[in-house]
Amino acid sequence: MSTSDVDLGRRHAARDFGEATSRCFDLMIAVTALVLLSPLFLAAMAAVWIEGGRPLFFAQMRLGRRGRPFVMYKFRKFGAASGTGGCPLTVAGDRRLTRVGAFLAATKLDELPQLWNVLRGDMAIVGPRPESMAFADCFRGGFEPVLDFKPGLLGPSQIHFRNECRFYPADADPTRFYREVLFPAKARLDLAYFPTRTRASDVAMLIRGVLAVLGWTPGGQATHDQAAAADNRLPDLLGAANRKTGAP
């Protein structure tokens, strides 16, 4: 056996070990979260059912790692008659939102069912936000590497765009604005972090993500260089994209 074969075997073993430890991390966090948050889970199910009956969940095809589609779950936040058509984005004052749905979206409780996706292995706890199939064509021009990583519940783009619906200008087409402004900003944030991520930085990102969901995004000096790079690039990314599209 040649030296190159030995080195290749070691690299594969290290990769497999890294993926195994990541999977253990995801399972541990997902199971713990499901146990601790089960009262909220049941309360959300009851609220959706009381207000509008079934279905309680919203299922949609999303892009997974390496572009493989999977079914992602959320609590239903739109009226049952809304179906799956219409704008693929949720904007401020979206008329499709129910009263319960608006609360779930504002608090991010509608995302809780994605813990099931983590258990299934479709998603990770920390990873890029899985895009809907409507924006599959956005992964080009250098953004293809985002798909190298398993999508996740939390990450730099989820933290910085915690209140994404507020970014859309009232006089702009939401879909075009997302394609030309928000998607590139999100993708660059993800690419500034994930290629050099570490287990420690993922733990820090998890903490930052939980704090963001609770309404407080840590500021000042970032704990890790990857997070700091993402933080510092956001204003420039949005500004450049806004100038490109002429958005205010």
Image: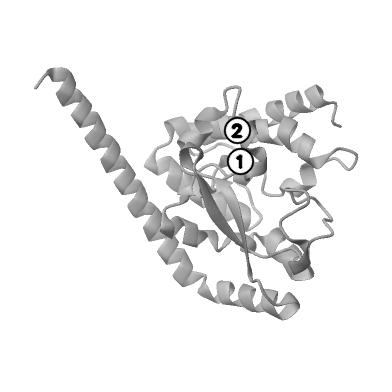
Q: Is residue 148 above or below residue 83?
A: above
Residue at disc 1, secondary structure: helix
Residue 218: give x, y in percent of width and height.
60, 46
Q: Is residue 133 above or below residue 117?
A: above
Amino acid bearing label 2: Ala
Amino acid bearing label 1: Ser
- Left or right: residue 39 versus residue 168 is left
Tell me the quarter of the image containing the N terminus.
top left
Q: Is residue 33 above or below residue 91?
A: below
What residue is drawn where x is 66% and y is 38%? 135
Give the spatial CA distance, label 2 vs label 1.
8 Å
According to the picture, the residue beneath numbered tag 2 turns out to be 187
9 or 193: nearer the eye? 9
For marks 2 and 1 on the same chain, the one whose residue lies earlier in the sequence: 1
What residue is drawn where x is 56% and y is 55%? 72
Residue 38: give x, y in percent of width and height.
51, 73
According to the picture, the residue beneath numbered tag 1 turns out to be 157
- Left or right: residue 31 versus residue 187 is left
Within 10 Å of disc 1 (Cα), the crowding (few <14, some 14-19, many 20+) is: many
What residue is drawn where x is 61% and y is 46%? 158
Q: Which mark is residue 197?
A: none
Is residue 202 visible from the viewing direction of this image? yes
Residue 148: give x, y in percent of width and height.
46, 34
Query: Do callouts 2 and 1 mark residues in contact (Cβ within 8 Å)?
Result: yes
Residue at disc 2, secondary structure: helix
